[in-house]
Amino acid sequence: MRLALAIASFVVLLVHGAVFYKQFFHKWENYQTGYFDQARTLAKTPAEKAALDARQPRVEQFIVTSFGDTRVDRCGTCHMAMDDPRFDKHAQPMRTHSYSAALGDGQVNGKWERRHKFADFGCTVCHDGQGRGLQAHYSHGEDHYWPDPLAGYVVQANWRKEFQPKLKGKEYMESNCAQCHTEEGFSGTTHVDRGRKLFFSNNCYGCHRIEGLSDGTQGPDLTEVGKKFKLDYLMESIVDPRANLATSFMPKFNLSDADVKDMVIFLKSRRGVNFAETSLQRYRAVLNAKRPADEAAKEPVLQGAALISQGEKLVTDRACTACHKLGARDGGVAPDLSFEGLLKEEAWVEEHFKNPRLSISDSIMPAFRFADADFKAMTAYLVSLKTAPAMTNGAESYKALCLRCHGEKGDGHGPIAWYLDPYPRDLTKAGFINSKSMERLTSSIKNGVAGTSMPAWGRTLNDTQAQAVLQYVFDTYTKEKRREVKPQKAPDKNPVAMSAESVSRGEAAFINRCAGCHGRKADGKGPNSPDILPRPRNLRNTAFVESVSDRRLFESILYGVQGSAMPSWIDYGLSQNDVGDLVNFVRSINQKSPVRSANARGN
Amino acid sequence: MAVPKATSEKGSGADAPMNRRRMLTWLSSVGLAGSAVLSAFSNFVFIKPRATYGQPQRFNIGKPEEYPSGTRISLDERRVCIVREGDKFAAISTTCTHLGCIVGIADTGFACPCHGSRFDQDGNVTGGPAPKALPWYKVSLAPNGEVEVDKDSEVEPGSYLNV
């Protein structure tokens, strides 16, 4: 017992001693005394030496109020020699802060003079980091709770391994330079400028809003993104958008490492505040930005070829090919526009510009806010593209027209398939393909599938070509011999009359039987849906539902859809009348009241 | 083998446990007393923490060339008046020794706007309620060639830095 007490008391003493040592013997004191010693050997006059002898270690700090919040920067406590040019060859923390003409430093009488004096600017305004910290770990922001680690110097341990080397480099500090040097083309912020250009040339502006630059609404507002997120998060969000949000539909763009870096630097510079402006100036800028521009009214109305060439210019300038394919340029995200004139009508294209989700209800295309005249010109250009690609047989047609979505293997995993909702059909599923009649398959090719990204190829392919493609799909992908499709017993017209009672019965049955996959909202996003391919149909896709006959709905519900997870509900005890109620329910949720439809058209 | 052991135990049996006990007691009390001393000392140190309040008291005011000969300029934010006569530099406090107002530069020296204290060119009191002269601060040349004023160390009036 006494032995235990003796040991315990010694442990307590040791712990106490450790805490005491940590609290009262700081590393920065050692650095400071080291600096005094070295400076003493370099001192030329006895007065200098005496002054150094008199100095005691203490916390050195700059208090800077000019840049946003009050900054207390105690960096000089360890980095004693940052403004002492005699230490330019020493190791950190005792090295002179480099002089550079790029920072505006100049030489006077052969001696460097700083443009950004530390006493006026502090340290963290350029470098980030935690100015008040007195331990390297905290002050450099290595602690992963600190939002702004030293830009380009410190990567936090919790950052993804593959990003860590990419997030080093002085360039990342440019995002802080841009807090004051906001002008474009400033020689010190070339990476920010390039990032800004990439923001437009990759059509980020279509989805994201940055105050004063863009007004997209699909994605998050990026006005203050640099204040909220660290470099690693910004980079991750660009190169791997689904890493943080599994449901994100932001495309992965084809960006080189250098592009990503510049985008990250640009985004980090978006802090929603600008040190160069006072709040009053900022308020004025906001007011001026909101003033409606009435230049559009003055522009002459273009016609014919002029309109088309204007449209071509707009389509190029506004970076449609960041996602779409157009000739040689291919964003690898959205459908091919190279022969849009053969696929769509002018009215459809113009309407699709204004409200992409009107005809394809799950399209991820942003609704751009361009002027009406611009939409007209772009539409005129797109519908003028009427040159079909050269195709001599079914294989070539498939390659030219179908492969982008249905994929090289015909399994519906084409290069852009992930961005399409609903997914392209898996053509290797013989169960599905062979259970559908030739008329239906041909019609899907020639007339397209309403409410999906499958366009009508009727004007691109003639009947023989369409047959050839279909045959190619059968031979290459489906592989199974076609069997005769027997017409199933189903009514041509819903025998149950549409009525409020029928719809409510249908709704109850839907919640009981269908919601697991199709979702309570019938939007195809039920709890089971992520595990199912092909995905459950979005039954609120009005264009699709309207294009489907009662007979097909009855067949699909009564007998199931082969090659998909839809079971045959007749086996689960649904009578024809129950199915009639379900059909009425599905029809009713896609009915638009006259008021709503008038609104939708008016956009 | 057992026999010698038994004898040794027996031989020291009378006071060995006593020694051990005393030893342990002594060790425990050293440990506890040491902790107590350390914590007491820590508490005393916490009374006067290692902190620096406000703007740094030692600061650079720029190159000597920026101050032509004959300059008497008051840096109000720093509360110091920079004097240059020929090659000689000095820094005189502009905080009135009476109630801490910022004194202004007058033809005759310094004048306090609050209660009319007057000081001559060197900061000596010539009138008003001020109890003592304005202090002079140490001026030196920093390694980067700028003039450094250290408000933490006062110097005798009339001591200049030669540049």
Image (cartoon, coloured by chain):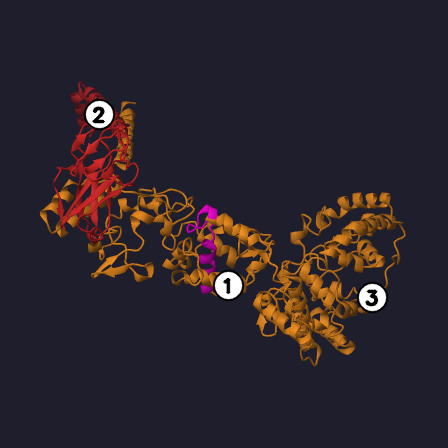
Q: Residue furthest front?
A: B107
At label 3, the amino acid type is Val
> Same subunit under labels 1 and 2?
no
Tell me, yes or no, whether the highlighted magenta stretch contains residue A266. yes
Q: Which mark is residue A424?
A: none
Quadrant in the picture for residue A322:
bottom right
Q: Is residue B126 left or right of residue A363?
A: left
> Magenta span covers which residues?
A257-280
Q: Which residue is mark 2?
A: B30
Q: Residue furthest top?
A: B14
Q: Residue at x 26, y 29 (%)?
A: B115
At label 1, the amino acid type is Leu
Q: Which residue is mark 3?
A: A485
At label 2, the amino acid type is Val
Q: Residue at x 82, y 54 (%)?
A: A558
Q: Is residue A41 left or right of residue A88?
A: left
| Label 3 neighbour load within 10 Å: few <14, some 14-19, many 20+ | few
Q: Nearer the viewer, mark 1 or mark 3?
A: 1
Q: Which mark is residue A198?
A: 1
The image position of residue B121, as x and y in percent, is: 17, 39
Label 2 SS: helix
The chain displayed red equals B
Q: Chain of mark 3?
A: A
Asked whether B71 or A482 is in front, the reply is B71
Asked whether A105 or A453 is in front, the reply is A105
Above or below: residue A322 compared with residue A113: below
